[in-house]
Image (cartoon, coloured by chain):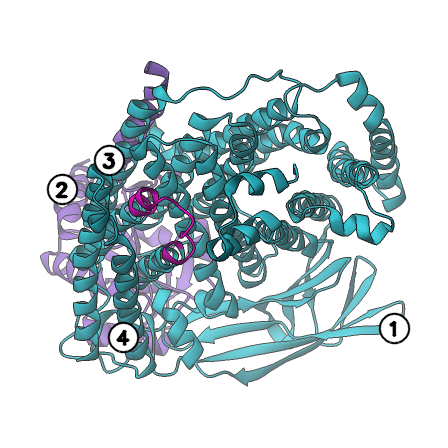
Amino acid sequence: MSRFLLPLGIFIVVVGFLAVGLTLNPRELPSPLVGKAAPDFSLPQLHDPTKVISSNDLKGKVWLLNFWASWCGGCKDEHPVLNHLAQSGEVPIYGMDYKDQRNEALAWLKEWGNPYSVVAVDEPGRVGINYGVYGVPETYVIDKQGIIRYKQIGPLREDILQEKILPLVRELQSQ
Amino acid sequence: MIPEIGHYALILALCVAVVQGIVPIYGAAVGDSALMSVAKPAARGQFLLVLLAFCCLGYAFAVKDFSVLYVAATSNSQLPLHYRLAAIWGAHEGSLLLWVFILTIWMVAVSFFSTHLPEAMRARILGVMGLVSVGFLLFMLTVSNPFERLIPAAFDGRDLNPLLQDPGMVIHPPMLYMGYVGFSVAFAFAIAALLGGTLDAAWARWSRPWTTVAWCFMTVGVAMGSGWAYYELGWGGWWFWDPVENASFMPWLAGTALIHSLAVTDKRGGFKAWSVLLAIMAFSLSLLGTFLVRSGVLTSVHAFATDPKRGLFILVFLAVVIGGSLILYAWRVPRVGLGGGFSMLSREGMLLANNVLLVAALGSVLLGTLYPLFLDALDLGKISVGPPYFDTVFVPLMTPAIFLMGIGPLAQWKKASLPELAVRLRWAFGVSVVTAITLPFILGQWTPLISLGLLLAIWILTTAAVDLRERLTHTDGSSLMGRLAALPRAYWGMALAHCGVALFIVGVTMVKGFEVEQDVRMNVGETATVGGYTFRFDGTEQYRGPNYIAARGTIHVSQGGRDVTVMYPEKRRYFVQNQTMTEAAISPGLLRDLYVSLGEPLENGAWSVRLYHKPFVDWIWGGCLVMALGGVLAISDRRYRLAWRRKVSDVPASTQMARQTVS
């Protein structure tokens, strides 16, 4: 009898794992860049292409870097969260307009609101490659020394903001 | 109105399925033939209802009814009609409807082609299929209703994913589902036999053709999926060991093992418990595949929209169906006697080894697929398991299996003699080894893997030739043609399927060993040479399709100054989802494919271009088609045709048995 129960036993173990698996998110990957220096960039600004925004200008403060694009659906989902955060003024958000067209990006910000202190234009996506962007939106928390402290893959949600990002930002700001 | 009719038809189908799942099985248990006879009309009625629902959804797509959420989410007014219809199975809800629809097709087929079965057996089979159907219909009606309304209606739809806008999409999912769901028939036969306690050779004989048909569809379906990835994803790979690919490959492996083990149960009465377990496994893995694809527990390129409620539903369904069957198995099977004894060196012994190896391969694929989930669940970190793992475990497991494939058909049942086999196969062995060692040198490059691949392929072909020659000398008949025709089709089917494996191996070996790939920057008018072919880039032009714009490149290919072909690779931008697609240009050939895809545009009309020369790559899919053809040939065997005819003429079963030739 017992050897005929073996398949059932194996199956129960697999089902147990699958049940646990349902509660996990496989897309939540740890980034190898967390704890490392944020890759440098120096790019034209969206609203004024004659000006340049460089990551070196941001040393000495805690900031968020948000990769987005006007063609990206998830960006629209997280946009109210960003707007809300920008209103609170707790931490500056810098935008990285990723593989996008300038006029469409500007129109998009006009329609949905602009939470960004400055938006850099990464039209060829090079900076995205340096940051290891899987897909937009992605958000990075960068500290005063220019070290990446946290990476959010996919849209930001209010609960992630309140439970993870803001406590981390406050801690980094007090250092 | 039409979508509501479809929705209503699904609800009615659920009611019919509940009746079909309970009444006939109860009838079979108490021996009430009036209750058992409910099964047939219920199955057919359910089919008609689901067909109606399917047509309603098709109609909603055809008339662009964007007040249906599913239609609005997966199509667009600019999408051509054939893709709008294929969009029925373009996402989660509709592909479930396709699943249930195909399940009812199989039910109707069973209801028509089962007149030779005892009534209780037929009632139980259709009952079990009805229960499976209850699960899927409930799933659809509770958490994935394709007829859900969107009010107010969308002005236009969000369009079908551009990756799916391809002729392969029209045919690949139905084929694959025919296979997946087809294993439900073998499953239902096994459960019916367990319920009835009639686990005998007759059971195996009845379920063999059904298993083979499902396996043929599965083979073609998996091959088409692979072919689609090859020409649609634009980087020339044909198998990625992606979880969803594995989800279709695992039932195929189980089905392949099942076909072989059923042969033993049918011919020798052995392996009964094992065959039943494999039948349960093949269908369980089909269900597991559904779970993996739909629940989002694993990352995969086949990103269906996921919803935890759906995942939970399938998991519970999975636990009930598979857990229930395995309990039934553990309860009933110990009473089943063993078949006749056999020595390890016999056809049974080799088929057993074949089964062990196939199941080990299956286990390693399952482990590799679920391993990231296991580690994550135990909080041991996040990893992904890729092709290196699968390649490493797969080749060593398949090598002995294929070696046995050559010997098995020549070995006697029960007990074979090793020296005798060695004498019969010495030429085949010698030819294989010598060719495998020397041929790579002639082709220009020798590596152990190329040599091994060729050895296995040639071994299959030469042993098949030896087998054919021996069978011909043992067959009566004056002319060669007469003797060839006298061999049973079941034999031809097996031989053909095995040769298909050889073709497949040749394809894999040659493309892995001799493929040439080049990433080049090409200015207009510039040439590049790959694999002896010269490619001249003549620039790109704008081109407008029904729902996309494309940059279409023109590439003239010549060999030794002689024009070979002109290729038109495209880079498309689909309007609605604003997604860029690489549409590779392929010039297929028996001995090689030329494969060109456009990378990124550079300045002055130049492009980065990928050029591939892929020797024998089409043999990979050709081999799969030949395997499937072998299956088709096997089920057209005389004894199955006789089984249909027996309905009319009612020949006694004993003479049937006597007439069967051993295959």
Q: Is label 3 in contact with label 4 (beta carbons under 8 Å)? A: no
The residue wearing badge 4 is: B56
Q: Nearer the viewer, mark 4 or mark 1?
A: 4
The residue wearing badge 1 is: B562
Picture quarter containing residue A36?
A: top left
Magenta segment = B110-125
The mark nearer the N terminus, 4 or 1, is 4
Protein chain holding label 2 = A
Residue A163's disc is 2
- Characterize the local packing of mark 3: few (<14), some (14-19) or many (20 or more) Cα atoms within 10 angstroms: some
Picture quarter containing residue B420?
A: top right
Q: Is label 2 in contact with label 3 (beta carbons under 8 Å)? A: no
Q: Nearer the viewer, mark 1 or mark 2?
A: 1
Q: In this view, does B337 lie to the left or right of B559?
A: left
The residue wearing badge 3 is: A19
Q: In this view, does B109 lie to the left or right of A15?
A: right
Mark 1 and mark 2 on one chain? no
